[in-house]
Image (cartoon, grey):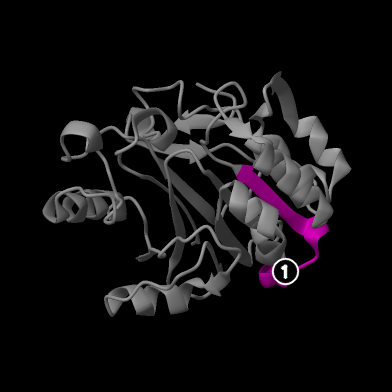
Amino acid sequence: MNQALGLNQDKKSFLDAEWPAPANVRTLITTRQGGVSRASFASLNVGAHVGDHAEDVQHNRALVQQQVAKPLAYLNQVHSARVINAMSALTAMQAGKPEAADASFCFQGEAVACAVMTADCLPVLLCDRAGTVVAAAHAGWRGLANGVLQNTVDAMQVNPLEILAYLGPAIGPEAFEVGAEVWEEFCLSQPKAQTAFTDIGNDHYLADIYALARLALADAGVHQVYGGTECTVLQRERYFSYRRDGQTGRMLSAIWLD
């Protein structure tokens, strides 16, 4: 069993976040295994926007929904810093017009599960120690630079010191090569972000998206951070990776309150 992720009931399809969340906070993280999609989308692809057969995606989403006690609210993710209530996201999704946003939150009593799709970008799951609010954020480098995690923490409406965050599977620091424009986006305004970059020459760097997320969360007042050990690029059999494969599927990370 990995330090950060434990197999759910010995299945290869679904993972549980391992963190000291309250008992009523539930999480689900999918791998690429256990679905019906084929070729580059094999097999548990939940992304309806990546060119996969619609009926296969619907089947995969139904498989995932069976593991989640509340309806999953999918977003139209656009690498923004916009955060919305998951109930609003669910209503829009059910109307066939998913909301353009990259994070959602919900409170106790709302019949919905927050969800984000990823295939290298970082999924961040959050809750408060009292188990009254949860959130899920899609944090690629653009979202991180634009403040998606700060906005998500603000939307939760609790003391940040009471918030726990879990960093799900993302591209690891050995695989995330970026250009000078990414370094400048973070380091010119935040000198401490330089610790998350390794200069490999010719204006190229290896970026640690987990470290960048921890810095952003710390700036937002969140210091109880867990996970952040996987690499979607290097773990080919377990995860989809856009950086590695180009056309590929998407995993799902979800969080809800019982």
What residue appears at the point 40 percent right and 33 percent down from the top-left corner? 241
Residue 192 against residue 175 in the figure, above or below: below
* Three-letter amino acid code at the position of disc 1: Asp
What residue appears at the point 38 percent right and 63 percent down from the top-left corner? 74
Q: Which residue is mark 1?
A: 154
Q: Position of residue 53 (x, y in %)?
A: 14, 50
Residue 116 against residue 198 in the figure, above or below: below
For the residue pair 31 and 110, the one nearer the viewer reads as: 31
Q: Position of residue 67 (x, y in %)?
A: 33, 50
Q: Is residue 14 magenta?
A: no
Q: Is residue 60 left or right of residue 168?
A: left
Q: In this orientation, does residue 22 appear?
A: no
Q: Residues within 10 Å of mark 1 (few under 14, many from 20)?
A: some
Q: Is residue 161 left or right of residue 12?
A: right
For the residue pair 80 and 60, the one nearer the viewer reads as: 80
Q: Residue lying furthest right in this view?
A: 191
* Count of marks overlaid on the render: 1
Residue 62 against residue 193 in the figure, above or below: below
What residue appears at the point 30 percent right and 42 percent down from the top-left corner? 249
- Look at the image and give the residue range highlighted in magenta: 154-166
Q: Is residue 231 left or right of residue 111?
A: right
What residue appears at the point 73 percent right and 30 percent down from the top-left corner? 197
Circle 1 SS class = helix
Q: Position of residue 136 (x, y in %)?
A: 54, 57
Res 238 → quadrant: top left
Residue 178 against residue 252 in the figure, above or below: above
Res 221 → quadrant: bottom right
Q: Position of residue 251 (x, y in %)?
A: 38, 43
Q: In this orientation, does residue 179 appear?
A: yes
For the residue pair 22 and 111, the one nearer the viewer reads as: 111
